[in-house]
Image (cartoon, rainbow, N blue to C red):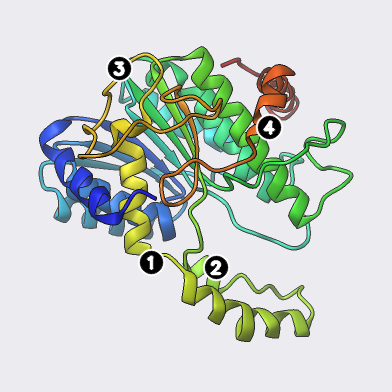
Amino acid sequence: MVNLQSVQASNAALRSTISGQVALFVGATSGIAYHTLLEYAKNSSKPRVYVVGRNDTTLSKITAELEALNPEGTFFAIKSEVSLLKNVDAACEELKSKEKRLDLLLMCPGYVKINPIYNTDGLEETISLHYYVRARFIQNLLPLLSAPPTSRIVSIHGAGNEGKLNENDLELAHSFSVRAAAMHTATMNTLALAEIAATHPSISCLHVFPGIVMTKATEHIVAKDWVLPLRLLWAYVVLPIAKFFAVTLSESGQRHLFHATSARYKPTAKPGAGVPLQPGMTVAIGEDGREGTGCYILNYDGEPIGNQNLFDEYRKKEMGKKIWQHTDEVFDRVLGVSGKP
């Protein structure tokens, strides 16, 4: 476990180490990514930060808060309902019209539903937010992410929950369940990010499990379509136990800033990229089981997580390429366009 004191020391060194970063935060108007955004603003030197959200009032409030935390920074709102892929494209075009580089892409959009909900893209919405939307941001923004000497992608989702994919139904159009959706999107995030890191050695890619964090979304996860006993069990048994073991939002934000900026999670191409390692700290083990290889599958505490044998099996089968091929096919079907990492 990377102890919190080391995390805080690394974050405090960010301002004097790195200046003028361009960052995009998706799914950061509340919860884990919002608190990461606050930590980023508080600790950064002259950043240019873009926040994607769907509500003008919320976005205005957040940008004002960020400006108060860091008067030297520049903060922009991009209004977009990113559950639809065409809106992801529009948000990316807005960013590309203003910037020629991107140093950090941090994504945490999504929620949990028991029953599938299909949007006008024809995709199950939670699966889309947890994987396809993130993949589209990555794909659209690869030219900007490739422009600086190094950059970083952080996807906060389900690292460690990877498993055997149903390769005949990757979208789960015919076999949806909450468990299957969580496993599929976690596995596809990991495989897609590993492929990006392998083919773009200046970009480090992190898939992170945030741990148990008591966000508003977590506390209000009970849905009207849950049967009453399940709702009572969640509210009066599961939540109280979870709160006992939960990571606070403040700590979660600090840890994810560390993930987004520390040289512990360097890209393949450049040792030392990021805030220098704290005393006694080493470069993390990558998805391929070796130190510093550009793609990191992490628990909330910054340590590697996941089934190494599964990762090795899928790497031998070149599943990362197959996932991107499938992803392109989905984009082509929904949007009439595609692109390759």
Q: Which residue is mark 1?
A: 248
Assign a secondary structure to mark 1: loop
Using the numbered discs, state the Cα–Cα distance from disc 4 to disc 1 in whole angstroms.
Answer: 32 Å
Q: Amino acid at mark 4?
A: Asn
Foreground tag (4 vs 1): 4
Report x, y in % for residue 212: 51, 63
* Residue 48, image quadrant: top left
Foreground tag (1 vs 2): 1
Foreground tag (1 vs 3): 1
243, above or below 28, in the image? below
In the figure, is residue 270 to the left or right of 67?
right
N-terminal of the pair, mark 3 or mark 4, is 3
Q: Amino acid at mark 2?
A: Thr
Q: Amino acid at mark 1?
A: Thr
View extreme (front): residue: 280
N-terminal of the pair, mark 4 or mark 1, is 1
Crowdedness near tag 1: few (<14), some (14–19) or many (≥20) residues, C-alpha within 10 Å: some
Q: Which residue is mark 3?
A: 148
Q: Which residue is mark 4?
A: 309
The reply to whether the C-beta atoms of the residues labelled 1 and 2 are less than 8 Å apart is no
Using the numbered discs, state the Cα–Cα distance from disc 1 to disc 2 in whole angstroms.
Answer: 13 Å
* Residue 310, image quadrant: top right
Determine the residue positioned at 24% across, 30% down. Answer: 21
In the figure, is residue 266 to the left or right of 319?
left
Crowdedness near tag 3: few (<14), some (14–19) or many (≥20) residues, C-alpha within 10 Å: some
Determine the residue positioned at 85% across, 36% down. Answer: 169
The quarter in which the C terminus is drawn is top right
Using the numbered discs, state the Cα–Cα distance from disc 1 to disc 3 in whole angstroms.
Answer: 33 Å
